[in-house]
């Protein structure tokens, strides 16, 4: 038997460490910093908070005083739910964000599945062209593409869609297309569609054609074959696509800010307002931490159900 | 009399001039074939010769470029695959990985219209799993089964709907050699018990000979010969079949009055006169190794038409009940002879380097003109 080298000298060890190091540096460390801010007290200073671990005022050394008042505010909003005149600013934003993210995910799935299916079934020679077309929007800046939507949806006579509809004589007065929830949803579906199509494609392209032939041979009509073979076997692709869309969509800031009206309150916007104009960093950090905790639940559920399928994919 | 005729089902399945081309590639060429009710028929040929394509045309998974397929009096051309009274067991099985064994077997039954009652389906699935002895694994998923178990589930699935025609694509190719041999006869008995007409595809001649009532030898999309295993082995109609099925000594030469004159055999090879070969034509003679006699002395001219030549033993493969001798003739050509071990009695068998004679009777040589 050859002697094993100490693990610090083994290349495999370091390659294996790479993703962990990445997660540590760019996820766990920032998260700990944000948690730290969320437990701080707002202050008129730079940075505008007093960390829980700070110099005691009487100079007697270091003291640890976590400030839970930001979490308390969220708790108060929950407690006040149902009371007359309750203004659950943050809860409403969470609700809106989850709702919009869910709608975005469902619409992306409904639009993206046929996309991915047809690309996966296309001849190999044109498959790459089709995939390239799905990814083509990434060649332009995300911000520019959202601005382009503003031009399309503009609610005055200069909006391209309104111009077209008026020009065709379908309507007389321009439609209020911009600055509402519909505009935000449109922008989000448009922006996130590729993130649904790509994982679905990667899954569907692996689907064994002979399974479809076997289903047909056993008497299943095309629709039955799709529902009882293709769809269940693409579950992992659906889950992966849904995660890729849902998770960033919950925290989306740019699209609601540019396409949404003042009434489209989403969590990303709240965080921005508290970090920026309101100068309440602990509150902003709290909202962000709670959002991450909220997202962990669906991630665990997604992960669990795709793991149970793991042994079945040939 | 009529009943008898129907029972023997002279042509239960008729394949008439069926061809298939993919672009310029002619994969199946003008295949005609009739198959009787309850027959087990094997399509045998090397990989890529178009066997699976022919089978897939029967299942309706490919459309013939030309020709007709008639099953039990019904032209299948217009019948879509999900309506055909055929079921196929796919190469490497194509079991649904997300369904349990029983759901795999029930899949076809659930597609029946009018719908079958739930307990009728359950009863049928139970019967099928009994048949292949897989009841114990009913709740497992395919990836939790061994290759042999998967094969049996696939068989149960393709038999569940009681198809008029069972199609097996390389049914045993995915199994280990040992399990494969055990399974061959088991599979035949099972198919016979169910009484289903069956066409199987294989590249393994031993498998075809063991399992099939009749064999069709295919090469390059052409059906070269159809016959029982014995006919195909003893009376091949072309060089390809003679060489593909079993071992043979092949001599090439020109047919003359004394026999076939070959460059690599000392005398013209005497053959049983065959009217359908013209004098002077280029032919081959195939002589099976077990028809070649081996002796230490020159065989006397006991009978007319004995072909013999002297040579030297260059190789011996001892296989227990018999040995395969490779004998180099003076001209350099090697002849193989398989010799029963009992042939030598108490005497020592010839060994490497020994001078021996090989001989065979004229009828042992099969004359082939293509
Ligand atoms: N769908 C197809 N398109 C193009 N060529 C095909 C197709 N299916 C089979 N072929 C070709 O037909 C030939 C015969 O294939 P197949 O019937 O699977 O052979 P076998 O089963 O005898 O090994 C192969 O050369 C294969 O490349
Ligand atoms: Mg094949």
Image (tube, coloured by chain):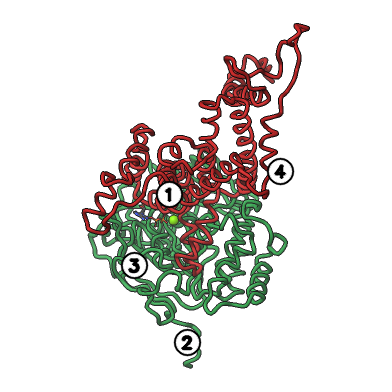
Real-space Cα distance between discs 3 and 4? 81 Å
Secondary structure of the residue carrying tag 4 is helix
Mark 3 highlights which residue?
Answer: B31
Vertical arrangement, residue A142 with respect to residue A169, above or below: above
Determine the chain carrying the residue at label 3. Answer: B
Q: Earlier in the sequence, mark 3 or mark 2?
A: 2
Q: Which chain's residue wears label 4? A: A
Locate ligand 2 by image quadrant.
bottom left
The mark found on residue A182 in the picture is 1
Mark 2 surroundings: few (<14), some (14-19) or many (≥20) residues within 10 A:
few
Q: Is residue B85 above or below residue B321?
A: below
Q: Is residue B218 above or below residue A290?
A: below
Horizontal arrangement in the rendering, residue B16 relative to residue B195 (left or right)? left
Q: Is the Cβ of the residue at disc 1 closer than 8 Å to that at disc 3?
A: no
Which one of the lettered chains is coloured green? B
The answer to the question of whether label 2 and label 1 lie on touching residues, with beta carbons closer than 8 A, is no
Q: CA distance from mark 1 to mark 3?
A: 62 Å
Foreground: A138 or B304? A138
Residue at x-position 65% and y-position 50%: B346
| Quarter of the figure with residue B192 | bottom right
Identify residue for label 2. Answer: B6
Query: Marks 3/2: CA distance?
Result: 24 Å
């Amino acid at each position: 038997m050859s002697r094993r080298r100490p693990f610090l000298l083994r290349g495999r060890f370091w390659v294996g460490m790479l993703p962990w190091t990445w997660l540590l540096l760019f996820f766990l460390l920032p998260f700990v910093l944000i948690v730290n801010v969320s437990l701080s007290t707002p202050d008129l200073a730079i940075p505008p908070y007093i960390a829980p671990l700070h110099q005691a005022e009487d100079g007697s050394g270091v003291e640890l005083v976590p400030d839970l008042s930001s979490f308390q505010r969220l708790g108060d909003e929950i407690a006040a739910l149902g009371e007359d005149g309750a203004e659950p600013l943050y809860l409403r934003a969470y609700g809106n964000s989850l709702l919009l993210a869910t709608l975005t995910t469902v619409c992306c799935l409904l639009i993206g599945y046929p996309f991915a299916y047809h690309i996966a079934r296309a001849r190999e020679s044109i498959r790459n062209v089709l995939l390239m077309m799905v990814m083509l929007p990434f060649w332009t800046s995300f911000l520019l593409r959202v601005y382009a939507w503003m031009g399309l949806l503009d609610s005055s006579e200069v909006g391209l869609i309104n111009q077209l509809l008026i020009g065709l004589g379908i309507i007389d007065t321009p439609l209020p297309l911009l600055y509402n929830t519909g505009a935000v949803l449109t922008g989000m579906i448009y922006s996130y569609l590729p993130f649904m199509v790509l994982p679905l494609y990667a899954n569907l392209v692996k689907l064994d054609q002979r399974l479809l032939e076997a289903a047909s041979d056993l008497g299943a009509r095309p629709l039955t074959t799709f529902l009882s073979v293709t769809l269940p076997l693409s579950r992992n692709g659906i889950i992966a696509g849904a995660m890729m869309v849902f998770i960033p969509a919950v925290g989306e800031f740019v699209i609601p800010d540019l396409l949404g009206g003042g009434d489209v309150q989403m969590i990303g916007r709240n965080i921005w307002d508290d970090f920026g104009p309101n100068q309440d960093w602990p509150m902003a950090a709290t909202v962000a931490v709670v959002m991450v905790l909220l997202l962990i639940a669906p991630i665990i559920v997604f992960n669990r159900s795709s793991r149970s399928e793991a042994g079945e994919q040939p | 009399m009529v009943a008898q005729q129907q029972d023997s089902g002279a042509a239960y399945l008729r394949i008439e001039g069926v061809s298939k081309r993919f672009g310029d590639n002619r994969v199946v060429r003008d295949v005609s074939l009739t198959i009787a009710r309850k027959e087990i028929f094997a399509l045998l040929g090397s990989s890529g010769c178009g066997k699976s394509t022919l089978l897939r045309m029967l299942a309706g998974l490919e459309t013939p470029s030309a020709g007709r397929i008639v099953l039990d009096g019904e032209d299948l051309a217009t019948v879509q695959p999900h309506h055909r009274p055929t079921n196929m067991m796919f190469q490497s099985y194509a079991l649904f990985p997300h369904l349990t064994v029983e759901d795999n077997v029930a899949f076809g039954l659930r597609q029946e219209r009018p719908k079958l009652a739930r307990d009728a389906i359950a009863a049928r699935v139970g019967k099928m799993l009994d048949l292949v002895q897989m009841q114990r694994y009913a709740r497992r998923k395919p990836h939790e089964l061994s290759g042999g178990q998967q094969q049996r589930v696939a068989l149960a699935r393709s038999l569940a709907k009681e198809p008029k025609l069972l199609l097996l694509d390389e049914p045993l190719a995915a199994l280990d050699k040992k399990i494969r041999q055990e399974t061959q006869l088991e599979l035949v008995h099972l198919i016979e018990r169910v009484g289903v007409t069956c066409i199987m595809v294989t590249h393994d001649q031993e498998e075809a000979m063991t399992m099939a009532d009749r064999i069709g030898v295919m090469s390059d999309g052409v059906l070269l010969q159809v016959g029982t295993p014995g006919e195909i082995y003893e009376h091949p109609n072309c060089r390809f079949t003679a060489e593909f099925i079993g071992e043979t000594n092949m001599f090439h030469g020109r047919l003359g009055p004394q026999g076939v004159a070959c460059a690599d055999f000392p005398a013209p090879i005497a053959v049983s006169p065959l009217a359908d070969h013209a004098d002077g034509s280029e032919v081959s003679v195939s002589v099976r190794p077990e028809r070649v006699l081996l002796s230490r002395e020159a065989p006397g001219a006991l009978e007319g038409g004995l072909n013999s030549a002297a040579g030297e033993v260059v190789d011996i493969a001892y296989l227990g009940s018999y040995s395969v001798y490779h004998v180099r003739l003076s001209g350099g050509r090697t002849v193989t002879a398989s010799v029963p071990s009992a042939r030598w009695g108490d005497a020592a068998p010839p060994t490497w380097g020994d001078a021996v004679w090989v001989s065979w009777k004229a009828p042992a040589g099969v004359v082939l003109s293509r």
